[in-house]
Image: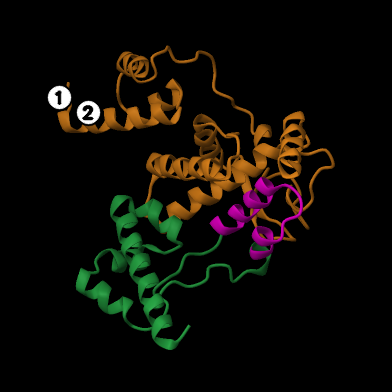
């Protein structure tokens, strides 16, 4: 994959992410903020983006969504479970729901 | 007598319908809406096509501490707290949304429902009245439902420290066998 292709892919991912997030937020803000792992202030910023802004953001050359599993325990539960699949998922879901939301820096 | 606002009545009816669809029992409806008992009864019959179950609501906190219910209620209370903290949700709205998210989670992971809506609502009431609380597991760091009067030093959750026979039901065994046969075939 050359650099141009990679940049193109990143743009695509960003675009789908932003559009999906906006759609989810417009349907139900509270539930969307849980699914996306965002706090209300970030959610409001995302929701209010205009199509032109979305395109500009998507083109910024950086991936806009961040990896949520910065906790190795959760990652381990989801990727390397040996026993019951549903239990491993339940355990991970409890830990995920207990994590703090992504905030805007003050 | 003050005249009731039509608009608020419509809103209450809407809420009642949503609650009935989620599986709330009549006692929940009576305490969360200002509609009369007769109207709620009628509404219930229309939405569900049957009379509401009679009898008291489950009132014991112990159920939430048994193994599988504890896993599910801990998940629910974590979602609920997230919504209250980050989602500008309050009261019954938070319970409803958290329950929807919980059900969605069950559906995507093909897990059987353990916590009914009425149980979830009771759980939140128990938390409000401090009859239950959560504590952090010393191993995984997750928050789990516990009794406030128990000792929680070095608490280990039911998933880090599984009881030896937990989850080993007849059904789970059959499912496992079916899966293995599927792999072999």
Along the line of sight, the residue nearer the viewer: B115 or A60: A60
Indicate whether B90 appears above or below A5: above
The answer to whether residue B133 is left or right of residue B154 is: left
Mark 1 — on which chain does it sit? B
**Whether residue A5 can be seen here:** yes
Residue at the (26%, 79%) spot, across then down? A56
Count of numbered tags:
2
Q: Which callout, 1 or 2, points at the residue further toward the start of the chain? A: 1
Q: Quadrant of residue A7?
A: bottom left
Q: Which residue is mark 1?
A: B3
Q: Which residues are magenta?
A: A75-97
The answer to whether residue B16 is left or right of residue A92 is: left
- Chain for colour green: A
Per the image, is A58 magenta?
A: no
Residue at the (33%, 70%) spot, across then down? A15
Name the image quarter holding the C terminus of chain A.
bottom left
Q: Which residue is mark 2?
A: B9
Return the x and y of residue B64 as percentages of the image width and height.
65, 37
Circle 1 or circle 2, nearest the eye: 2
Q: Quadrant of residue B143?
A: bottom right
Return the x and y of residue B123 as percentages of the image width and height.
55, 37
Along the line of sight, the residue nearer the viewer: B87 or B22: B22
Residue at the (32%, 76%) spot, across then down? A58
Q: Quadrant of residue A2?
A: bottom left
Return the x and y of residue B138 as percentages of the image width and height.
74, 60
Per the image, is A89 magenta?
A: yes
For label 2, the SS is: helix
For label 1, the SS is: loop
User: Badge 1: few (under 14), some or many (20 or more) residues near its Cα, within 10 Å?
Assistant: few
Magenta span: predominant SS is helix
- For chain B, the rendered hue is orange
């Amino acid at each position: 994959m050359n650099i141009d292709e990679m940049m193109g892919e990143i743009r695509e991912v960003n675009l789908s992410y932003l559009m999906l997030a906006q759609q989810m937020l417009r349907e139900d803000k509270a539930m969307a903020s849980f699914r996306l792992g965002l706090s209300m202030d970030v959610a409001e910023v995302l929701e209010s983006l205009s199509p032109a802004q979305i395109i500009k953001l998507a083109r910024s050359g950086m991936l806009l969504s961040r990896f949520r599993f910065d906790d190795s325990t959760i990652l381990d539960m989801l990727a390397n479970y040996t026993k019951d699949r549903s239990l491993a998922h339940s355990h991970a879901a409890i830990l995920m729901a207990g994590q703090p939301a992504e905030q805007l820096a003050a | 007598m003050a005249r009731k606002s039509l608009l608020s009545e419509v809103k209450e009816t809407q809420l009642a319908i949503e609650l009935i669809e989620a599986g709330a029992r009549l006692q929940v409806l009576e305490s969360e809406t200002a509609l009369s008992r007769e109207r709620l009864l009628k509404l219930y019959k229309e939405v569900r096509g049957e009379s509401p179950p009679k009898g008291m609501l489950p009132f014991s906190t112990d159920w939430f501490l048994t193994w599988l219910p504890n896993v599910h209620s801990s998940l629910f209370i974590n979602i609920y707290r997230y919504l209250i903290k980050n989602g500008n949700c309050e009261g019954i709205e938070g319970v409803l949304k958290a329950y929807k998210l919980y059900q969605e989670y069950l559906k995507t992971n093909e897990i059987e429902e353990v916590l009914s809506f009425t149980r979830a609502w009771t759980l939140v009431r128990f938390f409000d009245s401090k009859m239950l609380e959560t504590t952090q597991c010393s191993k995984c760091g997750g928050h789990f439902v516990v009794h406030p009067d128990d000792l929680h030093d070095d608490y280990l959750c039911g998933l880090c420290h599984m009881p030896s026979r937990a989850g080993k039901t007849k059904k789970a065994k059959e499912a496992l066998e079916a899966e293995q046969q599927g792999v072999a075939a």
